[in-house]
Image: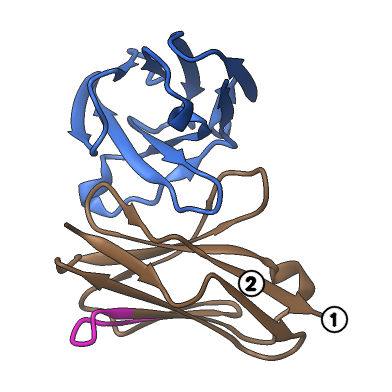
Chain colours: A brown, B blue
Amino acid sequence: SQKIEQNSEALNIQEGKTATLTCNYTNYSPAYLQWYRQDPGRGPVFLLLIRENEKEKRKERLKVTFDTTLKQSLFHITASQPADSATYLCAAGQNFVFGPGTRLSVLP
Amino acid sequence: ETGVTQSPTHLIKTRGQQVTLRCSSQSGHNTVSWYQQALGQGPQFIFQYYREEENGRGNFPPRFSGLQFPNYSSELNVNALELDDSALYLCASSLWGTGWGSPLHFGNGTRLTVT
């Protein structure tokens, strides 16, 4: 069955550093991947979409890459801030198969 | 622009009971999807409705059912509640349907506890 894995359950980084989150997918080839942010007690919020023919997408301090050979997407937050602390979810394919999420903590 | 709203925000039910959760889509959106999110997990797709018909279903039993109304609002019904049904239920609206890659706009969910 289609499966999404995210590299770690939790990631702690120092303020100002770049956070890199990994999303790996197996058993299918999605035409696009999406990244969402979820704060405690809230629904996920859409951040970025990247299509299979796009290698990289940027939005302000966010950058997403999509490597169809490795079946992997990387999500980067540059110049991270404590306000970036949240759970980040990767989703792929029709009906949006979601990964388990990575809980990012940016330490001041 | 009105976002996605869900009601109620919290609900406690007893095993074996039935529950109905409600969702109002973001204005202009014609597709609604429902997800179940257990604590510490990612959302799991339950089903999607487009033009008032089910347009895809995840690995959930028939006791999970839904409706979409002409104004694109939606209901999720769960019969014969089980303890494992305790979770956050998320509604998301989108335009055209997920096959187009249209981003999902989520509500803040209904927290269901089954005792």
Q: In the rendered view, does B66 fall on the left or right side of B82?
A: left
**Residue B8 in view:** no
Residue nearest the observer in this picture, A3 or A91:
A3
Q: Residues within 10 Å of mark 2 (few under 14, many from 20)?
A: many
Q: Secondary structure at mark 1?
A: loop
Quadrant of the drawing holding the C terminus of chain B: top right
The x, y position of residue B114, in whole percent, is 54, 22
The spot of residue A9 in percent (x, y) is: 53, 70
Point 69% across, 91% down: residue: A17
Give the image location of residue A100, x and y in percent. 44, 60
**SS state under label 2:** strand
Residue B14 can be seen, yes or no: yes
Quadrant location of residue A55?
A: bottom left
Give amino acid for label 2.
Leu
Residue A66 forms part of the magenta stretch = yes
Amino acid of disc 1: Pro
| Image spot of residue B62 (x, y percent) | 23, 20
Label 1 marks a residue whose chain is A
Q: Which span is picked out in magenta?
A: A65-72
Q: Which residue is mark 1?
A: A108
- Residue at mark 2 to residue at mark 1: CA–CA distance: 13 Å
In the image, is residue B52 part of the stretch drawn in magenta?
A: no
Q: Quadrant of residue A23?
A: bottom left
